[in-house]
Amino acid sequence: MIPGFGYGDNEEGVGITVDEAIDRAGGWGRFQTFLLVNVILAMNSAGLVVYGVFYLELQPEYINCVMKDGEVLKDLDGGCTFEAVCTDDNVVKYDINYDSKYTLINWMFQLDLFCQPVGLIGAYAFLGAALSCLFLPALGDKYGRYPVFQTTMAF
């Protein structure tokens, strides 16, 4: 039952059911199917962006951490972790397990950002999208939608 419509009475009181609302709107047709498919595709594409950001920030699997006293922590010991490599001052050398499914050759390898705080990079992308909503519509009104769209697609 959809409350608040107030169109007639039914068994449960004032209001209409979902089926009655669809009938009053003209039924379920091609437009409703098209709209439903597009909404589902839009939500899935946003999910792909979020998952892609996760893989950009994925830390590699570390093995064979060498400590200052010469002790080697193997992967099986559980001591050669991200926290040990990045926060423990006793770790002087480590290897990266390139055969692991958790190790990706991403931009963190290229820029050597293993121990840098990169967790906010995904948030910055969404912050940029939110801030651009403040000034891009005004630019679109002034210069036209097509030039603004082409400029944003270039970046």
Image (cartoon, rainbow, N blue to C red):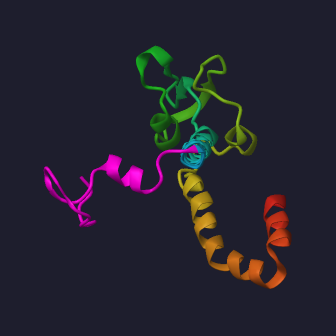
Q: Residue at x 57, y 40 (%)?
A: 51
Quarter where residue 103 is shown: top right
* Most frequent secondary structure within the magenta stretch: loop
Pinpoint residue 87: horizontal percent, then vertical percent.
47, 43
Residue furthest bottom as drawn: 142
Q: Nearer the viewer, residue 57 or 1?
A: 1
Quadrant showing the C terminus? bottom right
Number of marks drawn: 0
Magenta stretch, residue numbers:
1-29
Q: Residue at x 26, y 64 (%)?
A: 7
Residue beneath the point at 73% across and 45% down = 111
**Is residue 89 rendered magenta in the image?**
no
Q: Position of residue 27 (x, y in %)?
A: 46, 48
Quarter-wise, where is residue 33 in the image? top right
Is residue 18 in the magenta section?
yes
Query: Looking at the image, which is closer to me, 25 or 83?
Result: 25
Looking at the picture, does residue 135 appear above or below residue 11? below
Relative side of 102 to 79, left or right = right
Instruction: Kindly indicate the quadrant of the structure image that contains residue 56.
Output: top right
Q: Is residue 18 above or below residue 152?
A: above
Query: Which residue is drawn at the image coordinates 76% and 77% (left, top)?
Result: 140
Can residue 99 be seen here? yes
